[in-house]
């Protein structure tokens, strides 16, 4: 396994019509969750990736599991929980700039995960652990699991990649800030968006923000600037990498996970930091052109077409 991740994936219903969801009568059924969006992104680029989770032992949970498995992600560590349902979320796209998500996930199977859901041997053989700031927001036991995963990853020499993925609907702001800062301090690589950085450090200047994350503990920080691209910072250097122009954004949800997949894929391929960030920008941009959290994630040939990357 190159990468292991853990967290909740939900059944995603999207109205077939735009505008207020209250008027929608028909919905498409998809699946979405930050960590599987990321994992599927890596699998499409040919990497080996495993996902640890729980889903309900129900029809939707089985469909979700079959979907993620079918995308080439190892789901051997996912448990079916007979006592709790699979989480659901709705995505209302009023316009590309006005997307709302509505969660029905309280008490879901995944929110009942504990440190006991982690398999130490399984984690130990990977190179990277991807941690999303969504998991610690789900419950106290998920928060404990997140910390336990990082501790195990460090024990076994994995590189810990952390995306703060701030979701204000899930928890009180003060608790979110405190927890996400504590996790960022332990990660090797942090992938914050500009607004997440502002939320965590009260700093909006990208250059100062990048350095704040480094001082806080990370070895590498890649600050996501949306359409503007990204700026990476290491102990030695920093560089701004421009983004790609997208003709029409259809659905921005999942772009950050695609960005993370592109970046880690670049690192796994041994690319220099600037090129890994370029790949991250490309994957993130491609994702926005397609409706769905994962449907737009590119394969190597798509990346080559979009970003003139070599098609290895
Ligand atoms: O990054 C996209 C995710 O936010 C989406 O797939 C759903 O995992 C999700 C969440 O918790 O919002």
Image (tube, rainbow, N blue to C red):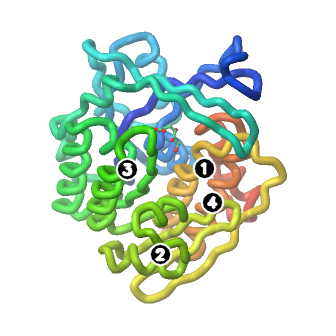
Q: Position of residue 223 (x, y in %)?
A: 52, 68
In 3D space, how far apart are the residues under numbered discs 3 and 4 (Cα atoms)? 44 Å
- Is the shortest distance between ligand 1 and the CB of mark 4 under 8 Å? no
Among the two numbered marks 2 and 4 on one chain, the one whose residue lies closer to the N terminus:
2
User: Please, what secondary structure does the residue beneath circle 1 have?
Assistant: helix
- Residue of label 3: 173
- Residue of label 2: 209
Q: Residue 255: which disc?
A: 1
- Residue of label 4: 312
| Label 3–label 2 contact, CB within 8 A | no
Residue in the picture at 19% in, 60% down = 156
Q: Position of residue 42 (x, y in %)?
A: 51, 49
Residue in the picture at 73% in, 21% down = 16
Outermost residue, bottom direction?
Answer: 236
User: Please, what secondary structure does the residue beneath circle 2 have?
Assistant: helix
In 3D space, how far apart are the residues under numbered discs 1 and 3 (Cα atoms)? 23 Å
| Label 3–label 4 contact, CB within 8 A | no
Can I make out residue 207 in this image? yes
Tell whether 254 sits left or right of 301: left
Q: Quadrant of residue 20?
A: top right
Outermost residue, right direction?
Answer: 247
Q: Compared to 257, does 55 lie above or below? A: above
| Label 2–label 4 contact, CB within 8 A | no
């Amino acid at each position: 396994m190159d990468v292991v991740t853990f967290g909740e994936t939900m059944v995603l219903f999207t109205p077939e019509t735009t505008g207020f969801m209250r008027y929608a009568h028909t919905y498409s059924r998809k699946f979405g969750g930050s960590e599987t969006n990321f994992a599927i992104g890596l699998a499409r680029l040919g990497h080996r990736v495993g996902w640890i989770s729980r889903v309900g032992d129900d029809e939707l949970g089985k469909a979700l599991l079959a979907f993620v498995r079918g995308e080439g992600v190892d789901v051997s560590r996912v448990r079916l929980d007979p006592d709790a349902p699979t989480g659901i979320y709705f995505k209302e796209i009023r316009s590309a700039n006005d997307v709302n998500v509505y969660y029905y996930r309280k008490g879901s199977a995944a929110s009942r995960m504990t440190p006991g859901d982690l398999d130490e041997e399984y984690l130990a053989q990977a190179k990277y652990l991807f941690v999303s700031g969504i998991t610690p927001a789900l419950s106290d036991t998920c928060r404990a699991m997140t910390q336990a995963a990082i501790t195990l990853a460090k024990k076994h020499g994995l590189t810990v990649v952390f995306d703060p993925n701030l979701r204000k609907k899930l928890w009180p702001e003060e608790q979110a800030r405190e927890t996400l800062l504590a996790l960022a301090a332990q990660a090797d690589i942090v992938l914050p968006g500009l607004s997440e950085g502002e939320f965590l450090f009260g700093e909006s200047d990208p250059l100062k923000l990048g350095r704040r994350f480094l001082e806080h503990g990370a070895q590498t920080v890649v600050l996501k600037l949306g359409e503007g691209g990204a700026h990476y910072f290491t102990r030695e250097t920093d560089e701004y990498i421009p983004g790609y122009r997208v003709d029409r954004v259809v659905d921005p949800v999942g772009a950050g996970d695609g960005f993370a997949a592109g970046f880690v894929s670049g690192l796994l391929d041994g690319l220099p930091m600037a090129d890994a960030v370029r790949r991250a920008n490309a994957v993130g941009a491609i994702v926005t052109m397609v409706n769905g959290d994962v449907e737009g994630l590119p394969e190597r040939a798509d990346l080559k077409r979009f970003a003139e990357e070599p098609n290895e």
